[in-house]
Image: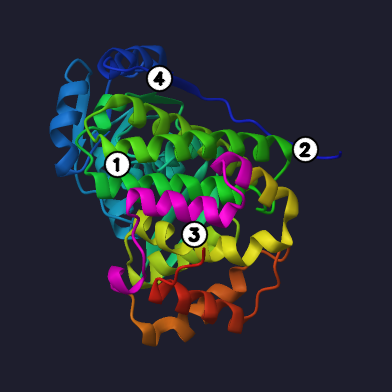
Amino acid sequence: MRFVHESHAQRVHFAPGSAADALAGEIERLGARRVMVIASPSAGAVADRITAGLPVALRHDEVVMHVPTEVAARARKAAARAEADAVVSVGGGSATGLAKAVALTTGLPVVAVPTTYAGSEATAVWGTTEGSRKTTGTDPRVLPAAVVYDAGLTLSLPVAMSVASGLNAVAHCVDSMWSPGSDPIDRALATEGLAALAGGLPLVAAEPSGLKGRELVLYGAYVAAVAFSSAGSGLHHKICHVLGGAYRLPHAQTHAVVLPHVLALNAPYAPEAETRLARAFESGSSLTGLADLRRAVRAPRSLRDLGFARADIPAAAELILPVVPPDNPAPVTRAVLERLLSAAWNGDDLA
């Protein structure tokens, strides 16, 4: 057993019903006096409530999926004009992503308050989109200094979006099994995260107003993201980042649709990962476990339903091929990618 594992320093609060207090404590700890709050209009009421006691210098609500470079540039200029000394993001992955884009060039500390299960708040990964190309990277400056989780803040997230976001977190677990930087610690964390997600998501779907399922999913999403932050992007995330950037597909739903097809490709070539995943799903196989979970929560099924055109499959495969990890468990060619995308476009059942 020979590997190097790097852990990231971050304070994490699981604070049911007390997000405002935990957030105020973190801002005080940072010594911030002029806070920039990033939240989309749909998260505005929550943001106003939990930041009411903070020294807010700026409320910024231009939050766009995949963080276009021009949107990031305007947010950075706004932070500079406001002389902000800290950033608070409230919302999903797009809000966190914009806060990271600001931190990347300014070095401002970020405190993230997630209202979805995106997991971006627990990683040092940033991403921006210019035209049809999404660029991602890692930088310690973008890792939020602190995260405040309050499952009550996810209660307004509709079931369909909760499911898609939760399956995005499942994808973090699956990719962490064979990503380029994956190590035994990442795989252990991914197994733990997947077990929590597989247990919690059906509860969210069955009882949207209940906190037990949402707390399980929030915990699973965090642990999954910690694993993914260390392991890095595998084939699944490379595919989804290309599709999201080039074709403006919705982030979480794209992950939910593509995941079973990547799992079907890779699992036969990764027996250790297959064993771990099947155990976490409490199923005879990883693919059957994922299929059972997807049926239980009525997951998104096809790229066609997300607005992706069948005619774009060859071009998309061409864009994905150069970013395929060289050590992906299964061999990947352009033809393999076209078959995978065709199956995802159709919404084929795999188990």
Q: Which residue position holds label 4?
A: 14
In percent of width and height, residue 192 lies at 58, 33
The Cα–Cα distance between marks 2 and 1, rounded to whole angstroms, is 39 Å
* Relative to 249, 41 lies left or right: left
Mark 3 vs 4, N-terminal side:
4
Nearer to the camera, 169 or 149: 169
> Which contiguous range is marked in magenta?
278-307
Was residue 295 drawn as part of the magenta stretch in this picture? yes
Secondary structure state at the residue bearing disc 3: helix
Residue 311 seen in render? yes
Mark 2 vs 3, N-terminal side:
2
The amino acid type, in three-letter code, at marker 3 is Leu
Mark 2 vs 4, N-terminal side:
2
Tag 1–tag 4 contact (CB < 8 Å): no
Q: Which residue position holds label 3?
A: 259
Instruction: State the residue at coordinates (60%, 68%).
Output: 323
Please tell me whether residue 293 is drawn above or below residue 267 in the rendered image: above
Instruction: State the residue at coordinates (24%, 38%).
Output: 81
Mark 1 vs 4, N-terminal side:
4
Q: Which residue position holds label 1?
A: 205
For label 4, the crowd category at 10 Å Cα-Cα, with few meaning under 14, some 14 to 19 and many 20 or more, is: some
Pair 3/4: label in front: 3
* Relative to 88, 337 lies left or right: right
The amino acid type, in three-letter code, at marker 2 is Val
Tag 2–tag 1 contact (CB < 8 Å): no
The amino acid type, in three-letter code, at marker 1 is Ala
Q: Which residue position holds label 2?
A: 4
